[in-house]
Image (tube, rainbow, N blue to C red):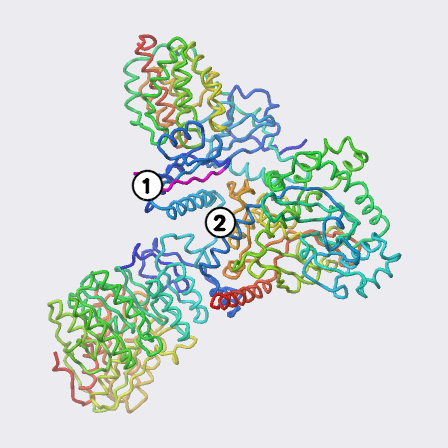
C-alpha cells in the first residue's frame, strides 16, 4: 500500500538537461536505499498528467513546461529528502564536464571526497603536527584512517580513537606502518596471498614478519589491521585493538586471529587477554603475540616471539611450520659481541628478547627509532644510514657478529639487499678480523623486490641467511659462542 | 548598437528558412549544451546553432565541428563589456553559410518500397518509452490514423496526450509527432499533415521552448536534417542510405533522433495500410 | 572488511599507497590548513561537526530565501532610527573606527556631510566637531545600512530602502544613492560641486525616484541582479546592465514628473547607479542569517580604509578586524600604487552574498579591467566555490554552464583551503577628494578568519555550558 510512502518534489526553473543526463539521474535516484520510484521530467502538462496517473505527483506542485521537475517516492521522509538533495547536487555539478573544467587537484579531505565520493579510507603521512587534524577531518566524514605520521600527541590519539570507536571506524595509528585491508596493501606492506589468518598489530614489522612467515608456509592472510605502537599503552588502553577485533570477528573471513604487540601495559594486557579469551570461546582461535612475554597456552595462547606466534597460527589452520633452521655456519666467528642493526622496530625487539635470554654481550639498534630518523627518511626507505653503520662495525674490535633485517614489500626500498650487500663487502675489506653477517628477509615471493632475488644478493655478499628473524638471532648467538635456548622449542 | 561579430567558420550551413540577415544581428544565449547552442533573436525566435555534419535544425545554423563552436561562444562572453551590447551578430556566418532546404523534396514522394519500410523497421530499436508513459510506435500509428481520417475530436485529444510527454529538452512525444508529420509529408498526405499540424498548434504552450520551435517548424513542413536524410533515403530506395540515415539519427540528442524515426516509420507503415504511397 | 571496498584518499607521501590500484587512489595536493596557524586549525576541526553543518544549512537557506523588494527612496533621517536626531550622528563604511584613526578620504567625506547638514560652516569647523565627538560616527552595518567607499550617510541624504515580504519581523536594509564617478563625496571630496550635487540628490533625485518606484510595479532586486549577471555585470565593479535595466523600469514613471529630464540624464550618465541598490539587497539577504547560532557563515565583509572587518553568523554582531592594504590592479594614467588609499567601503557585501568577485565568470571584461585574462575570470569564480556553502539559485553564471554563483563564505572552508575571498573594488586616492584612481582586486586578510574561528569556538564553548545547566 502507498499509504506508508512519502512523496515529495523539487522544481528547478528553466533548467535544461538532455534526457540521457535525466535518465541517468532517475536511475541513480531509484537505486538509492528506501526509494521506490523517481521521476525526472520537464514539467509539461503531459508529463504532469503521467506523474499524477502513477501517483507520482505531490499536491501543490507549481511548474511550467520549461521547468525541470523531480519527484521522489520512498519509504521514509528522510530518504526522500536526501534523494532530492542528491538530485539537486547532481544537477548543479554539471560544470565538471564542461570543456574548461578545472585542472586543480583536490587539496583538502572534503575536496578529496568530492572528487572521489566512494572513498572509504584516508591515508595520512603529513607532518605530525597536522596529522591529527587531517585524521579528524576524515573520521568526521565517516572514513577509516591509516595514519602513518608519528609525532602525534597521546591526547590526540586518545581523542581520535574514541571518536573513531564511536563511529565504528578504524583509526589505524598514529605511527601505523602497515595494513592490508581486503587484500589492498597500505604503507609498508607485503604482498600476501589471501587466506585464513587475520592480524591485528600494534607493531608494523612484527605483523609483517608473522604474516610473511605464514605466507611462505602457504598460509594466507585475511586482513592485517595496524593500530599504532601506543594502542596497548595504559593511556590509549587498546581501544583500536578491540574495535579491530570486533570488525575482524564480524567480517568472518578470518579463521584464526593473531594480535601482535610489544609487551602491553599490565592492566591493558589483562583486558586484552580477557577479550581474546571470549573470542576464542566463541569459536575463533586466537594467538596473542606479546613480544618478550613468556609463552603460555592457557587461558589464551600467548607467544613471546614473532616466529612462535606464526608457528602457532599455522598449527591452528593445520599447517606445520617448523622453527627455521639456520643455514650451515661456515667459518664460525670468535666468541664476541653481537651487534644488531635493524630497520624494523619489532624485529629489533624480537632479537633483543632472544639475545637477552642467551645472556650474551649484545647490542641491538633500531634505526627506525625517532632518535635516528629525525629529519631523514625511515631506514626501510633509505638504507644509507644503516649501510654506514655496517661499515663502521668493522672498525669496532668488540663486534664479531652483525645481525640484520631486510624488509621487503610496498613502500620499502626497491633493493634493500643490494645496499646491505655493498656495505658488507666494504666492511669485510676494512676489517682485520673474521666478521660474521647474519640476516633474515621479511618478505614474500610476490613482493615487488622479489624474495629469491634479494636472498641471492645477500648470499653473494657472504651474508648468512636465516629463515626467520628469530632463526637469524639464534644463529648469531651460536656464532658468538652462546647457547641457543630457543631452537628446540616447537 | 554593436555586437560581437565572429569570423565565419569553414563549412557553415544554414536553414534556407532562416531568412533575412536582420534576424541574426543581435542574438542572446538561451542554453549552451555540449554540442549545440540555443540562441534567440531579439523578438524571441530561437536560432539553434548545432554541430555535426547532418544535424542542422529548422531555423538554425550548422557548424561542422563541435570543437570549433566552443571557442566562439567563450570569446563572445569575454568580449561583452561596456562598449558592446551583450549580443552576438552572426550576419557574417549567415552570409558565408551554404543554404540547406530542410523540406522533404516533392519529387521524392510516393515511391516507397515495402522492402525498404521493413528495412527501416529492422533498424529501429524496440522502443517502449520509459518516460513518455506510452509505446511510441503505437502512439505514432494512432496519430497517423487519426490524421488521415476525417476531422474528429479524437485527434486533438491524442495530440494533447502526446505533446510534452517525456523527459529531456525535447520530450519524446514531440519527437514522435515531428516524425509522423515528416512521414505524412513524404507520403504526400497534405491534408493529414495539415490536420495534425493544426491540432498541434494550440498545444505548443504545453511543451519546452526548444520543442515548441521544432514542432512549429514540422507543422510548417520543415524538419531536422537527420529526418530529411531518412526520408530522402527511402525515396531513393537505397537500403545503405537508410541505414546510414538511421545511424546519424541515433547520434542526434539522447534519444530524440530515434524517437523521430519511430514516428516517421509508423506514419509510413500506416500509409501503407491505406493503400497509398507504398509500392 | 571495509564496506564499499578500499578506496583511498592520500594526504601525504605517494609511497604510502604504492600498492593500491591507481584508479582507487585520490592523491591530495595537501597543504597545511589555517594559513599554518596550528591553534586555528585545531579550532577549525573542533567546529567541523554536524552542529555547524546544520547551522550553515539553515543560514544559507535563510540568505537565499530573501527576495529584496524596493520599498522606496527616503531621507536617511526618516529611514534609519540612529539618524533621526536630535543628536548629530553620521554613518561610515567598515568596522567601527574613531575619527582620529580614519584615512583621508573618509575624513573628507564626513567633513562634506557635516557641511551638507549645516552642522559646520567651514571644513575646519567640521573637523573640530568630528574630532571632539560633537558629531558622532558609527558603522553603517550597525544600522542595517551599507555605503560604498567612505560610505558616509547623514540625515538628509536619500537612501534606498529594501525589504523582504517574508516575516514577521519585517526587516529593512538601506544604502545611499550613487553619486556617479569623478569628484564625489564617497572618495572624500567636499567642494561646492559635491555639496550642490548632494543637495540636488536630496531635493530632486530622491523624491522623483521615490514617486517613480511607488508608481511602478514592485522591483525584485534578486531578479534584477540575476538578469544583469546574464548581461555581463558581475554586480560590483560593473553594474552597467543592472543600471540600464533599473532605468528602463523606472523611466516611464519618471517621465511625467517634474525634474524628469535632469533625473533621467543623471541616470543615463551613471553606470554604477544600481550598485548601491544591489548592496542594500545583499545586506538584507545576509542579515537574514546574522544571528544563526553555531553557523560559520560570513555575514559581513567590509573595510574602513584602515581595517578589514568581518562578522560571522554564529557570533552575531562581533567584528573580527585586521589591517587592510591597498588593492592590486590597474591605475588610471598618472597614478600608481603609491597614491592608493588602503581598501575601503561596504561594497564587499556583494561578494559576501556571492556576486562581484565571486561572479567574475559572468563578466570577463572586468577581469581585463583589473589586469587579468578572461580565463582568470572563470578560475576566480571556480576558486570561490571552494570556500562557499552553495551556488546561489537566482544567479546562474552562463559561462559556467549556468551553475549558480558561489554564495555564502564559510569561515571553516576558508581555513581548510587557505583560499581567501576575492573582492572587486575601486581604488581611491589616499588624499581626500581626488577620487577613484583605479580598480583592482583585494583578498580579505587571513587574520580575520583566524580570529573568527577562535570566536566561534569560544561561542560554542558557551553554548555547551548553557546546555548543561
Above or below, C132 against B200 in this view is below
Q: Tag 1, which secondary structure?
A: strand
- Residue A301 occupies which quadrant of the picture? bottom left
Q: Where residue A318 sits: x, y (%)? A: 10, 67
Q: Looking at this view, is A429 or A173 the one in front?
A: A173
Output the chain of dot 1: A
Above or below, C469 against A431 in this view is above
Residue C367, visible in the rendered structure: no
Alpha carbon of mark 2 to alpha carbon of mark 1: how far? 36 Å
Residue picked out by circle 1: A36
Is C82 placed left or right of C356 in the picture? right
Residue A329 magenta-drawn? no
Output the chain of dot 2: A
Is C26 placed left or right of C212 in the picture? left
Farthest residue toward the front? Answer: C469
Q: Where residue B57 sits: x, y (%)? A: 47, 25
Q: Where residue A246 sits: x, y (%)? A: 26, 65
Q: Callout 1: 10 Å neighbours few (<14), some, many (20+)? A: some
Q: Tag 2, which secondary structure?
A: loop
Is C402 placed left or right of C181 in the picture? left
Residue A189, visible in the rendered structure: yes
- Residue A286 occupies which quadrant of the picture? bottom left
Nearest to viewer (mark 2 / mark 1): 1
Residue picked out by circle 2: A102
Query: Which of the labelled discs sits on residue A446, or is there none?
Result: none
Farthest residue toward the right? Answer: C121
Above or below, C35 against A269 in this view is above
Q: Looking at this view, is C286 or A436 the one in front?
A: C286
Q: Looking at this view, is B214 or C463 the one in front?
A: C463
Determine contact: label 2, label 1, CB under 8 Å: no
Q: Give the range drawn in magenta.
A: A1-12
Q: Where residue C110 sits: x, y (%)? A: 79, 57
Amino acid at each position: 500500500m502507498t499509504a506508508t510512502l512519502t512523496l515529495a518534489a523539487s522544481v528547478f526553473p528553466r533548467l535544461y538537461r538532455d534526457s540521457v543526463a535525466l535518465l541517468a539521474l532517475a536511475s541513480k535516484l531509484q537505486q538509492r536505499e528506501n526509494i521506490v520510484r523517481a521521476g525526472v521530467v520537464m514539467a509539461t502538462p503531459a508529463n504532469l498528467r503521467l506523474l499524477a496517473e502513477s501517483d507520482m505527483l505531490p499536491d501543490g506542485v507549481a511548474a511550467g513546461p520549461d521547468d525541470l521537475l523531480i519527484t521522489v517516492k520512498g519509504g521514509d521522509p528522510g530518504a526522500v529528502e536526501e534523494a532530492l538533495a542528491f538530485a539537486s547536487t547532481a544537477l548543479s555539478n554539471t560544470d565538471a564536464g564542461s570543456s574548461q573544467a578545472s585542472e586543480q587537484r583536490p587539496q583538502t579531505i572534503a575536496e578529496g571526497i568530492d572528487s572521489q565520493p566512494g572513498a572509504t579510507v584516508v591515508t595520512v603521512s603529513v607532518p605530525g603536527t597536522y596529522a591529527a587534524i587531517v585524521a579528524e577531518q576524515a573520521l568526521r566524514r565517516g572514513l577509516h584512517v591509516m595514519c602513518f605520521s608519528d609525532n602525534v600527541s597521546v591526547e590526540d590519539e586518545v581523542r581520535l580513537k574514541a571518536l573513531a570507536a564511536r563511529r565504528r571506524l578504524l583509526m589505524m595509528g598514529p605511527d601505523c606502518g602497515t595494513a592490508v585491508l581486503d587484500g589492498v596493501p597500505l604503507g609498508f606492506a607485503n604482498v600476501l596471498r589471501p587466506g585464513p589468518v587475520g592480524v591485528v598489530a600494534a607493531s608494523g614489522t612484527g605483523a609483517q614478519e608473522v604474516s610473511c612467515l605464514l605466507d611462505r608456509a602457504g598460509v594466507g592472510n585475511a586482513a592485517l589491521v595496524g593500530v599504532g605502537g601506543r594502542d596497548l599503552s595504559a593511556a590509549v588502553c587498546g581501544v583500536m585493538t578491540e574495535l579491530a577485533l570486533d570488525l575482524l570477528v564480524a567480517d568472518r573471513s578470518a579463521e584464526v586471529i593473531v594480535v601482535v604487540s610489544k609487551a602491553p601495559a599490565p592492566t591493558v594486557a589483562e583486558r586484552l587477554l580477557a577479550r581474546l579469551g571470549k573470542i576464542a570461546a566463541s569459536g575463533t582461535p586466537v594467538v596473542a603475540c606479546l613480544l618478550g612475554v613468556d609463552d603460555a597456552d592457557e587461558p589464551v595462547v600467548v607467544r613471546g616471539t614473532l616466529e612462535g606466534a606464526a608457528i602457532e597460527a599455522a598449527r591452528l589452520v593445520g599447517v606445520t611450520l617448523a622453527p627455521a633452521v639456520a643455514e650451515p655456519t661456515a667459518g664460525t666467528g670468535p666468541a664476541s659481541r653481537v651487534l644488531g642493526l635493524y630497520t624494523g622496530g619489532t624485529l629489533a625487539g624480537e632479537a633483543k628478547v632472544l639475545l637477552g635470554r642467551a645472556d650474551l654481550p649484545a647490542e641491538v639498534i633500531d634505526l627506525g627509532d625517532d632518535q635516528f630518523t629525525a629529519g631523514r627518511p625511515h631506514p626501510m626507505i633509505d638504507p644509507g644510514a644503516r649501510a654506514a653503520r655496517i661499515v663502521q662495525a668493522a672498525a669496532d674490535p668488540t663486534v664479531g657478529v652483525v645481525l640484520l633485517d631486510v624488509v621487503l614489500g610496498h613502500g620499502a626500498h626497491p633493493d634493500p639487499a643490494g645496499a646491505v650487500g655493498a656495505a658488507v663487502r666494504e666492511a669485510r675489506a676494512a676489517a682485520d678480523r673474521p666478521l660474521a653477517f647474519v640476516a633474515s628477509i621479511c618478505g614474500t615471493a610476490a613482493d615487488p623486490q622479489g624474495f629469491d632475488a634479494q636472498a641471492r644478493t645477500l648470499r653473494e655478499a657472504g651474508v648468512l641467511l636465516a629463515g626467520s628473524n628469530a632463526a637469524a638471532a639464534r644463529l648469531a648467538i651460536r656464532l658468538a659462542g652462546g647457547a641457543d635456548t630457543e631452537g628446540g622449542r616447537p | 548598437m554593436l555586437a560581437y561579430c565572429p569570423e565565419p567558420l569553414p563549412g557553415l550551413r544554414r536553414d534556407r528558412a532562416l531568412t533575412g540577415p536582420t534576424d541574426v544581428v543581435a542574438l542572446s544565449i538561451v542554453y549552451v549544451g555540449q554540442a549545440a547552442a540555443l540562441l534567440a533573436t531579439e523578438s524571441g525566435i530561437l536560432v539553434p546553432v548545432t554541430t555535426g555534419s547532418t544535424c542542422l535544425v529548422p531555423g538554425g545554423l550548422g557548424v561542422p565541428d563541435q570543437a570549433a563552436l566552443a571557442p566562439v561562444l567563450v570569446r563572445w562572453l569575454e568580449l561583452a563589456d561596456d562598449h558592446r551590447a551583450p549580443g552576438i551578430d552572426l550576419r557574417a556566418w549567415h552570409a558565408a553559410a551554404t543554404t540547406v532546404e530542410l523540406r522533404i523534396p516533392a519529387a521524392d514522394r510516393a515511391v516507397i518500397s515495402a522492402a525498404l519500410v521493413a528495412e527501416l523497421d529492422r533498424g529501429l530499436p524496440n522502443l517502449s518509452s520509459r518516460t513518455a508513459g506510452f509505446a511510441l510506435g503505437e502512439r505514432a500509428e494512432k496519430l497517423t490514423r487519426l490524421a488521415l481520417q476525417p476531422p474528429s475530436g479524437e485527434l486533438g485529444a491524442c495530440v494533447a496526450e502526446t505533446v510534452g510527454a517525456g523527459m529531456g529538452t525535447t520530450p519524446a512525444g514531440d519527437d514522435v509527432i515531428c516524425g509522423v508529420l515528416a512521414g505524412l509529408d513524404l507520403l504526400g498526405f497534405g491534408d493529414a499533415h495539415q490536420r495534425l499540424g493544426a491540432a498541434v498548434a494550440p498545444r505548443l504552450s504545453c511543451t519546452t521552448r526548444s520543442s515548441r520551435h521544432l514542432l512549429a517548424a514540422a507543422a510548417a513542413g520543415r524538419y531536422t536534417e537527420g529526418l530529411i536524410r531518412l526520408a530522402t533515403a527511402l525515396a531513393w530506395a537505397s537500403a545503405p542510405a537508410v541505414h546510414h540515415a538511421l545511424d546519424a539519427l541515433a547520434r542526434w540528442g539522447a534519444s530524440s533522433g530515434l524517437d523521430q524515426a519511430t514516428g516517421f516509420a509508423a506514419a509510413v507503415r500506416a500509409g501503407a495500410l491505406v493503400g497509398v504511397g507504398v509500392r | 572488511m571495509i564496506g564499499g571496498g578500499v578506496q583511498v584518499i592520500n594526504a601525504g607521501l605517494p609511497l604510502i599507497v604504492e600498492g593500491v590500484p591507481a584508479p582507487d587512489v585520490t592523491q591530495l595536493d595537501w597543504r597545511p590548513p589555517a594559513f599554518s596557524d596550528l591553534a586555528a586549525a585545531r579550532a577549525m576541526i573542533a567546529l567541523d561537526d554536524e552542529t555547524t553543518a546544520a547551522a550553515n544549512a539553515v543560514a544559507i537557506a535563510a540568505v537565499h530565501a530573501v527576495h529584496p523588494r524596493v520599498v522606496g527612496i527616503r531621507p536617511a533621517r526618516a529611514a534609519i532610527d540612529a539618524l533621526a536626531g536630535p543628536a548629530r550622528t553620521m554613518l561610515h563604511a567598515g568596522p567601527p573606527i574613531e575619527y582620529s584613526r580614519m584615512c583621508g578620504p573618509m575624513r573628507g567625506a564626513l567633513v562634506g556631510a557635516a557641511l551638507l547638514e549645516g552642522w559646520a560652516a567651514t571644513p575646519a569647523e567640521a573637523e573640530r566637531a568630528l574630532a571632539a565627538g560633537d558629531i558622532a560616527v558609527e558603522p553603517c552595518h550597525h544600522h542595517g545600512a551599507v555605503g560604498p567607499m567612505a560610505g558616509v550617510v547623514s540625515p538628509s541624504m536619500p537612501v534606498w530602502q529594501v525589504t523582504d515580504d517574508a516575516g514577521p519581523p519585517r526587516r529593512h536594509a538601506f544604502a545611499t544613492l550613487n553619486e556617479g564617478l569623478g569628484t564625489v563625496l564617497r572618495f572624500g571630496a567636499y567642494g561646492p560641486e559635491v555639496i550642490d550635487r548632494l543637495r540636488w540628490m536630496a531635493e530632486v533625485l530622491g523624491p522623483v525616484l521615490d514617486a517613480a518606484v511607488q508608481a511602478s510595479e514592485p522591483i525584485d532586486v534578486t531578479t534584477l541582479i540575476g538578469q544583469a549577471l546574464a548581461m555581463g555585470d558581475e554586480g560590483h565593479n560593473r553594474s552597467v546592465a543592472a543600471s540600464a535595466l533599473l532605468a528602463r523600469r523606472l523611466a516611464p514613471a519618471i517621465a511625467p514628473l517634474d525634474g524628469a529630464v535632469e533625473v533621467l540624464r543623471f541616470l543615463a550618465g551613471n553606470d554604477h547607479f544600481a550598485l548601491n541598490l544591489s548592496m542594500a539587497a545583499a545586506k538584507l539577504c545576509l542579515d537574514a542569517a546574522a544571528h544563526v547560532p553555531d553557523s560559520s557563515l560570513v555575514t559581513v565583509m567590509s573595510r574602513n580604509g584602515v581595517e578589514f572587518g568581518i562578522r560571522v553568523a554564529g557570533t552575531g554582531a562581533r567584528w573580527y578586524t585586521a589591517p587592510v592594504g591597498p588593492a592590486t590592479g590597474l591605475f588610471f594614467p598618472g597614478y600608481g600604487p603609491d597614491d592608493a588609499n588602503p581598501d575601503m567601503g561596504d561594497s564587499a557585501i556583494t561578494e559576501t552574498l556571492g556576486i562581484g568577485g565571486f561572479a567574475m565568470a559572468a563578466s570577463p571584461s572586468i577581469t581585463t579591467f583589473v589586469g587579468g585574462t578572461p580565463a582568470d575570470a572563470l578560475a576566480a569564480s571556480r576558486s570561490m566555490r571552494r570556500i562557499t556553502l552553495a551556488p546561489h539559485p537566482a544567479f546562474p553564471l552562463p559561462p559556467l554552464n549556468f551553475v549558480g554563483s558561489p554564495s555564502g563564505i564559510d569561515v571553516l572552508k576558508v581555513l581548510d583551503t587557505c583560499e581567501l575571498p576575492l573582492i572587486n573594488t575601486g581604488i581611491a586616492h589616499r588624499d581626500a577628494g581626488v577620487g577613484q584612481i583605479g580598480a583592482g582586486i583585494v583578498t580579505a586578510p587571513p587574520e580575520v578568519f583566524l580570529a573568527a574561528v577562535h570566536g566561534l569556538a569560544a561561542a560554542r564553548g558557551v553554548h555547551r555550558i548553557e546546555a548543561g545547566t
